[in-house]
Amino acid sequence: MKIGIISDTHDNRRNTARAVEIFRRHSVEYVFHAGDIVAPFTTLAFAELVDVKFIAVYGNNDGEKLHLKDVVEGFGGEIHEYCYKGELAGNKIYMTHTDHNIEEVARSQMYDLVVHGHTHRQDIRRLGRTLIVNPGEATDWITGAGHAVVLDLDDMSHIIEPLVPQTA
């Protein structure tokens, strides 16, 4: 089972649309958004992914929480206040926005996958049996390089997909 992982879109509609195309091309079954969507209209691009479940957590810049919740739930997605805890394809997943307790959660070995955002810096590594994934920012405002990640939950392999066209 493939999932798409994205974070820190910060209303960047262009890169969000590119992520949707990447997720469609890879036939992901779920999209995990680790927060800082910002405005509710940004999530509407994910509604175009038919039969793909959208799961998100709020980030520190998500101010319109009630409207964001209404929009996300309106297309069948879900958004969580601080963290998401669930299980897919036999893998226990923990997702939050900040990086405050990521090391502790991963060290607990209670989860196979820990997803976060907030730092705008990509961080993909193993801590014991737990895979930590921060896809980096989807917007390209801080690093100049927006990314999304496609993760195969069957073998925990991943592909890092650039959202900003690469120049030769």
Image (tube, helix red, strand yellow):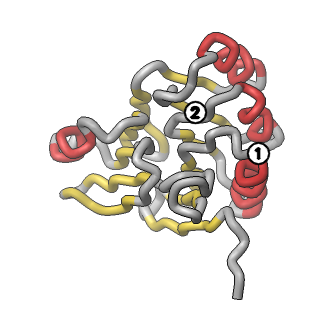
Percent coordinates x, y for residue 136 in the rendering: 48, 55
Q: Which residue is mark 2?
A: 55
Q: Secondary structure at mark 2?
A: strand
Give the residue furthest to the bottom: 168
Q: Residue furthest front?
A: 142
Residue 77 drawn above or below residue 20:
above
Quadrant position of the C terminus in the picture? bottom right
- Seen at 49% across and 30% down, the residue is 59
Q: Quadrant of the N terminus?
A: bottom right
Look at the picture and state if 124 lies above or below 31: below
Q: Does residue 2 appear to the left or right of 14 in the view shown?
A: left
Q: Residue placed at 40% from the left, 34% from the top?
A: 96
Q: Crowding at label 1, few (<14), some or many (≥20) Cα neighbours within 10 Å?
A: some
Q: Nearer the viewer, residue 145 or 89?
A: 145
Could you tell whether 70 is left or right of 56 in the image?
Answer: right
> What residue is shown with label 1?
13
Residue type for callout 2: Ile
